[in-house]
């Protein structure tokens, strides 16, 4: 298979397969969780606080208090790479065009040099998270194959995308094909690995917020 | 597979519900929960990272409750949870966790880790890996009515003593009283002045109350050990006594987990809502004060003092402002700890740790955070509202040669009743 065929495959059947597995996987994971159910809580709630779970979904995104100081080494690169990743994913014009092509909606993108900067920030932040995973005793101790695989699958699409844009290593066509392929691998892995937190964190925060609110504590 | 392991694994399968599955699926092993836990910060041992304390539960969930895990199991790629493993985790989940729930407020994913450790203990207990000290406490509760083996006669002797001291009658088994007051064994044995304080306060405030000779002990070691059946039996005693005496409210004493056990777990244990309300003594005192029924002498104590929030009362019970409103009336120099209220640090003795002799060394280590918090303030007096925290604090202070007076807030209120000047 030549590089053009490779590119055509990843842009065509490859993408379809990846998106299908991703969507089915997401539905399955949510199904796996909700079908377990939970017993209704019969204790009298402290006060009626509608929306506590939803509030926690928002408030947990903003680290506060001592946690920031105590865990800055993990929090800062973590936030940076998430923000950088999302900016590159959703505000790079070719990505928006791809989304427009598939689902029919689009939005204005950011200038390419800005995306370039965000890609570099993301790559550096990801390298720092890898370093803390290797060096921080707690993170190293907790790490499983899931974590190393999750990191690699997140890092590769950013790296290959950035390299394709700068025409590094391979020809643009090959690099772009590799970029799309690694993005597809990430898409497939998303629902089945720890990366599934991109969905389940909303479920978890909601449960947490509701449980604490029942006791009169904002979480 | 041994029968006890099978029982343990079945108990674990039982406790995996939607929130648990969501929490386990969400964990990215960032390790932030470690920084929130006194057992980790004081030992620096990564094994004490909160989420790791339930690792066998996570493995079982992954292997049996997720598609990839099931496939892995079919292909023989996963290692099943073993009895040796559960035995090894007993130390982490019982000795190294007070169920304080600080990690649950810190996790960026929103994982309620304390909720899961509480459930994980169900499996450990069923597999026979609960610590002997906690098993003993449960056995004494079931056989004698109290985790410390305190019998009704002991309580009666303390009642007589407190009646003599206060000159008041302490009502027992009065049907139709508004409130049923409960005690913890720790109070009966070590801090009976709490009972005298109640008598004086309720006499002043005109509160109709009673004790019950059938249910005077509020604590619930069944919850601490993680055996729902036993926890149900223990809480039913209180429910039966309260419904028999037809009280409107049951007052949880100055004990942290007794409050959450009765207030939030109890109805779920017995499978129905109560026919009465549950109120923590601090909530009641605050309410009486707000209603103008609890008149204080206005002589605020000038001693610099601070307040230790019992985890189960504050973070896991929502009683945070009440003690502060009361202290504003009682103390002229109240100093707040650096992290307090819902983000307080545990004393190290909750969740069954203080009943678990095996955990003694780690408990004293975990006290290190509290020690630093107190030292930062440099106060000579520490107020709290949990007899178990109080004894843990006193032991910790003694161990580290710190000279601090530890008092219960209810007694402090009783000392400051209007028109009852104590010389």
Image (cartoon, rainbow, N blue to C red):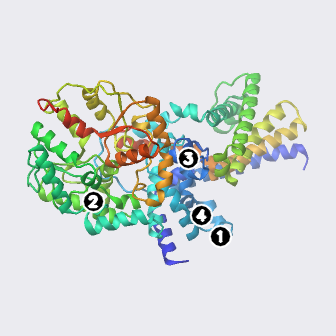
Of circles 1 and 4, the one toward us is 4
Give residue B63's mark.
Answer: 4
Of circles 3 and 2, the one toward us is 3
Above or below for B15 versus B297: below
Residues under labels 1 and 4: Cα distance?
A: 10 Å
List the residue tagged with mark 2. Answer: B235
List the residue tagged with mark 1. Answer: B74
Q: Chain of mark 2?
A: B
Residues under labels 3 and 2: Cα distance?
A: 33 Å
Above or below for B196 versus A29: above
* Secondary-structure class at tag 1: helix
List the residue tagged with mark 3. Answer: B40
Above or below for B392 versus B120: above
Residues under labels 4 and 3: Cα distance?
A: 28 Å
> Is A11 left, or right, of B192 in this rendering?
right
Q: Residue at x 48, y 49 (%)?
A: B364
Residue B151 locus on image (x, y percent): 22, 63
Q: Residue at x 54, y 55 (%)?
A: B53
N-terminal-most mark, 1 or 3: 3
> Is B156 left, or right, of B389 in this rendering?
left
Of circles 2 and 1, the one toward us is 2
Q: Chain of mark 3?
A: B
**Which quadrant holds the C terminus of chain A?**
top left
N-terminal-most mark, 2 or 4: 4
Residues under labels 1 and 3: Cα distance?
A: 36 Å
């Amino acid at each position: 298979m030549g590089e053009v065929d490779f590119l055509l495959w990843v842009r065509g059947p490859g993408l379809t397969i990846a998106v299908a597995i991703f969507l089915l996987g997401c539905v399955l994971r949510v199904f796996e969780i909700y079908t377990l159910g939970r017993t209704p809580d019969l204790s009298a709630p402290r006060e009626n606080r509608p929306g506590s779970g939803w509030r926690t979904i928002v408030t947990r995104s903003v680290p506060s208090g001592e946690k920031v100081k105590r865990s800055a080494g993990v929090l800062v690169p973590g936030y940076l790479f998430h923000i950088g990743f999302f900016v590159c994913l959703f505000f790079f014009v070719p990505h928006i065009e791809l989304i427009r092509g598939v689902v029919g909606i689009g939005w204005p993108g950011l200038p390419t040099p800005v995306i370039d900067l965000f890609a570099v920030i993301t790559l550096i932040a990801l390298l720092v998270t890898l370093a803390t995973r290797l060096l921080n005793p707690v993170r190293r101790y907790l790490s499983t194959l899931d974590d190393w695989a999750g990191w690699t699958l997140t890092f590769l699409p950013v790296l290959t995308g950035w390299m394709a844009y700068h025409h590094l290593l391979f020809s643009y066509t090959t690099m772009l094909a590799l970029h799309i392929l690694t993005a597809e691998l990430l898409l497939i892995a998303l629902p089945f690995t720890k990366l599934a937190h991109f969905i389940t964190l909303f479920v978890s925060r909601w449960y947490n917020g509701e449980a604490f609110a029942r006791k009169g504590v904002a979480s | 597979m041994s029968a006890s392991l099978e029982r343990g694994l079945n108990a674990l399968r039982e406790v995996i519900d939607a929130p648990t599955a969501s929490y386990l699926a969400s964990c990215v092993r960032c390790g932030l929960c470690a920084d929130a836990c006194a057992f980790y910060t004081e030992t620096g041992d990564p094994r004490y990272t909160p989420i790791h304390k339930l690792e066998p539960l996570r493995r079982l969930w992954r292997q049996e409750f997720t598609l990839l895990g099931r496939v892995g199991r079919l292909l023989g790629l996963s290692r099943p949870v073993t009895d040796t493993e559960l035995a090894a985790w007993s130390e982490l989940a019982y000795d190294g966790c007070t169920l304080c729930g600080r990690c649950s407020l810190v996790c960026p994913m929103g994982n309620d880790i304390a909720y899961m450790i509480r459930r994980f203990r169900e499996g450990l207990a069923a597999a026979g890996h609960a610590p002997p000290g906690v098993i003993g406490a449960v056995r004494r509760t079931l056989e004698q009515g109290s985790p410390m083996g305190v019998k009704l006669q002991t309580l009666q002797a303390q009642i007589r003593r407190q009646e003599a001291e206060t000159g008041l009658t302490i009502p027992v088994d009065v049907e139709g009283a508004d409130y049923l007051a409960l005690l913890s064994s720790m109070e009966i044995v070590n801090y009976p002045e709490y009972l005298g304080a109640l008598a004086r306060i309720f006499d002043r405030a005109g509160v109709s109350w009673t004790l019950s000779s059938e249910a005077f002990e509020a604590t619930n070691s069944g919850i601490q050990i993680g055996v729902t059946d036993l926890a149900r039996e223990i809480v039913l005693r209180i429910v039966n006594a309260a419904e028999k005496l037809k009280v409107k409210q049951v007052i949880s004493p100055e004990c942290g987990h007794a409050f959450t056990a009765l207030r939030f777990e109890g109805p779920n244990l017995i499978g129905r809502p109560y026919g009465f309300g549950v109120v923590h003594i601090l909530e009641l005192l605050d309410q009486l004060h707000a209603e103008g029924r609890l008149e204080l002498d206005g002589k605020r104590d000038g001693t610099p003092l601070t307040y230790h929030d019992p985890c189960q009362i504050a973070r896991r019970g929502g009683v945070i402002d009440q003690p502060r409103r009361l202290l504003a009336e009682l103390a002229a120099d109240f100093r707040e700890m650096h992290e307090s209220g819902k983000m307080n640090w545990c004393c190290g003795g909750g969740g069954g740790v203080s009943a678990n002799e095996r955990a003694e060394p780690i408990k004293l280590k975990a006290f290190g955070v509290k020690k630093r918090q107190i030292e930062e303030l440099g106060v000579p007096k520490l107020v709290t509202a949990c007899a178990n925290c109080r004894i843990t604090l006193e032991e910790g202070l003694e161990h580290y040669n710190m000279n601090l007076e530890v008092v219960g807030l209810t007694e402090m209120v009783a000392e400051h009743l209007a028109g009852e000047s104590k010389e």
